[in-house]
Image (spheres, rainbow, N blue to C red):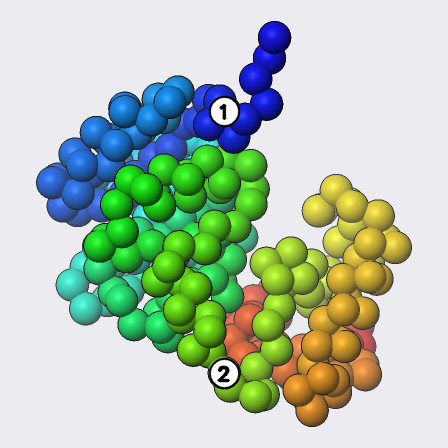
Amino acid sequence: MAADSAADELITAVIVDDHAAIAAGVRSWCSQAVPPINLIDAGDRLADVWTGPGAAAEVVIFDLELVPRRPDFGELRRLVDSGRRVIVYSQHTDDATAIKCVDLGALAYLTKREGPDHLVPAIRAAGRGEPYTPPSLSGALIADDDPGRPRLSQRETEVLRAWFVSSSKELVAAKLNITVKTVDTYIARVRVKYANVGRAARTKSELVGRALDDGLITLAELNQTVIPM
């Protein structure tokens, strides 16, 4: 009989971390999981996430700061935009960094103080394409009390970003493998959330402006296409 428990899912993950001891610890946790999680160690080689065995891994465990004092939010966005399921595993414990990573599309943000009790379930959840909220992230989200900041879900953000760089909702639907009606539903939800914080965005151009203000998309990304308003 096929098991339906999350613990019975067979998952391959690739870890990108420049500390061998961290990678060794994660490998040990993954090997002791039931069933074991197959871990590919890319070291600090980001290229190994895109080529070779790491390219096919369901989950990317990403050290945000491979270069000291230079957290690589750009690479995180690139991974998310390409459809990779990312867990940020970082030494940063501040709320702002955690929230930014989640806003960029990471399915989980864990500090390196959080051990296998949270990292293993986070990998399982990411393998299913689902978010995971460990204690550190939960605290960060509670602390994020900016009254002008709507709390958009990962999928809402994904649809919004796709719509901004597409010429039609039909193209968004095809890209994300959803219906045009579902695209409309997500956009409507986003409009409601912005209206609820006093930042109504009734047109596409207004919504683009809100997203630019909140860092959901950049001018460089928008300039890659012509967006009918």
The residue at the far right in this view is 181
Identity, as a three-letter code, of the amino acid under mark 2: Asp
| Residue 7 visible (yes or no) | yes
Decide which of tag 1 and tag 2 comes sooner along the chain.
1
Find disc 2 in the rendering and name its residue. Answer: 145
Q: Neighbour class for label 1 at 10 Å: few (<14), some, many (≥20)?
A: some
When the figure is inspected, residue 42 is found, relative to residue 158, above or below; the finding is above
Quadrant location, the C terminus: bottom right
Query: Left or right of 59: which side holds 46?
Result: left
Find disc 1 in the rendering and name its residue. Answer: 9
Whole-number angstrom distance, CA of label 1 to CA of label 2: 36 Å
Q: Residue at x 56, y 45 (%)?
A: 130
In the rendering, at what x and y percent does residue 40 appear?
30, 29
Q: Residue at x 14, y 45 (%)?
A: 19
Quadrant location, the N terminus: top right
* Residue 36 figure quarter: top left
Q: Residue at x 29, y 72 (%)?
A: 94
The residue at the far top in this view is 1
In the rendering, at what x and y percent does residue 77 appear?
46, 58
- Circle 2 SS class: loop
When the figure is inspected, residue 22 is found, relative to residue 74, above or below; the finding is above
Q: Are marks 1 and 2 in contact (CB under 8 Å)?
A: no
* Residue 67 numbered mark, or none: none
